[in-house]
Amino acid sequence: MSEVKIKALIVDDEPLARSMVRCMADGHAGIELVGESESGQEAIAAIRTLKPDLIFLDVQMPGGDGFTVIEALASEHLPHVIFITAYDQYAVRAFEVHAIDYLLKPFDRDRFEQALRRAVRQIETERSGELNERIFSLLAERRPPAPYLERFIIKTEGRVFFLKAGEIEWVEAEGNYVVLHAGGKGHLFREAISSLETRLDPRRFQRIGRSAIVNIDCVRELQPWFRGDYKIILHDGTELKLSHRFRDNLNKYLGGSL
């Protein structure tokens, strides 16, 4: 059994039946009985309040049968279910609603133990999966971000060479690829500009338009243009347009002076 107890609720309109289930379940250290209900309506309210992991659910009760309870909670917190009934014609329907097991009255302790073990395994397996998901999520949050690109592998005219990110003056979209401008030359790189933007250090590179990213260190001056746009002049004299849509990207790195 796990250290965290499985919360169980007994739902049956017969006091003797509830007492029998209580006695059989009480002997399990991993089970915590959180309540009992004697009608369908009481069961629905108790499940919503107590949020049990498991319910021992009688099929025939006043105020709605066991299947009515399941239907009422279909879009809410639905515990695992072990159906209990004196009528075996409900067995097929019980498994159609994904009950863990089906106990036909009168059942003995061995049969009850079998059903309970099956329920415990199922619940603990699910808890283990949820715990793993939480652990992986926490690890992902703590994992350092992927390093930004520091160099590019350029393949051109039958040769391969490296281009340092700091040497790139600006990036121009070219269909699904980009052209990396450096030292008066353009180098085709097989990656879309939107994807490349996320892999460039934002302290150095900023998107200035739908089809351009600029190296901040290569900017010589900015000149006001039309409709709130700016003209960006690079050190080599290249002129680029800073569109109004991307103005805030650059503005925060210039101390809000635009």
Image (spheres, rainbow, N blue to C red):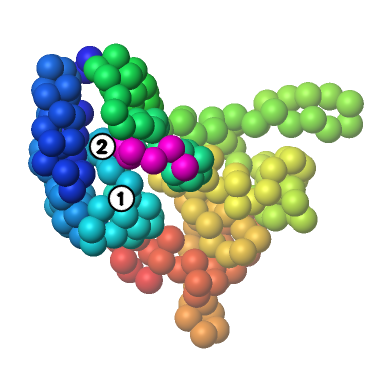
User: Can residue 64 be seen from the camera position used here?
Assistant: yes
Q: Which mark is residue 218?
A: none
User: Can residue 124 be seen from the camera position used here?
Assistant: no
Quarter location, residue 136 = top left
Helix, strand or loop at mark 1: loop
Place of residue 122 in the rendered image (x, y in percent of width and height, measured from the top left): 37, 26
State yes or no: residue 86 in magenta. Answer: yes
Rate crowding at label 2 as few (under 14), some (14 to 19) or many (20 or more) other CA atoms within 10 Å.
many
Quarter location, residue 249 = bottom left
Helix, strand or loop at mark 2: strand
Q: Looking at the rendering, in which quadrant would you find the N terminus?
A: top left
Query: Where 72 sits versus 165, above or below?
Result: below
Query: Where 47 sits versus 138, above or below?
Result: below
Q: Name the residue under label 1.
A: 60
Q: Could you tell me the amino acid type at mark 1? A: Gln
State yes or no: residue 148 in magenta. Answer: no
Q: Could you tell me the amino acid type at mark 2? A: Phe
Place of residue 225 in the rendered image (x, y in percent of width and height, measured from the top left): 53, 79
Q: Looking at the rendering, in which quadrant would you find the C terminus?
A: bottom left
Q: Give the number of callouts.
A: 2
Q: Which of 64 and 161 is in front in this view?
A: 64
Tell me the distance, in whole angstroms, between the alpha carbons under discs 1 and 2.
13 Å
Q: Give the range drawn in magenta.
A: 84-89
Report the residue at 28% width, 42% height from top. 57
Report the residue at 25% width, 53% height from top. 61
| Residue 185 placement, left or right of 48 | right
Q: Mark 2 points at which residue?
A: 56
Q: Nearer the viewer, residue 209 or 60?
A: 60
Place of residue 67 in the rendered image (x, y in percent of width and height, measured from the top left): 37, 52
